[in-house]
Image (spheres, grey):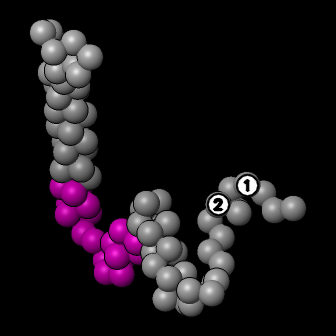
Amino acid sequence: MAHHAFRARTVMVGPQGPIVAYQNLMKIMSVEGLTRQVQLQRRYEKPTVKRHRLAYEKALYTYNTSMNAKINLLMRGHRTEYPWS
């Protein structure tokens, strides 16, 4: 019996054909971030460009987390059970 982590990443070619299996594989790889990592390693990235990219990604993550927290706070007041609140 295979490990759960390995089985979750295994893509079987079924009766739908290899195109559907390839689409499933690409979806799994993009969720895990492998496609972006491969694209970044195709060319050399200068250290300054890498620092700027990492700083941008960090700032974007911070912005998105704070924005999601604000949206969740606002959505707490819009309940479907109690329309008067």
Residue positioned 78% across, 57% down in the render: 3
* Left or right of 21, for residue 79: left
Residue positioned 34% across, 76% down in the render: 39
Residue positioned 22% across, 19% down in the render: 79
- Residue 70 found in image quarter: top left
CB contact under 8 Å: marks 2 and 1: yes
Question: Which mark is drawn over residue 50?
Answer: none
Helix, strand or loop at mark 1: helix
Q: Residue at label 1?
A: 4
Name the spot of residue 8 as percent of width and height, x first.
64, 60
Amino acid bearing label 2: Ala
Give, as a single range, the part of the protein colored magenta.
Answer: 35-53
Classify 51 as above or below 34.
above
Classify 77 as above or below 27.
above
Q: Residue at label 2?
A: 8
Q: Does residue 78 appear anywhere in the picture? A: yes
Helix, strand or loop at mark 2: helix
Magenta stretch holds residue 56? no
- Residue 75 found in image quarter: top left
Depth check: 55 or 22 in front? Answer: 22
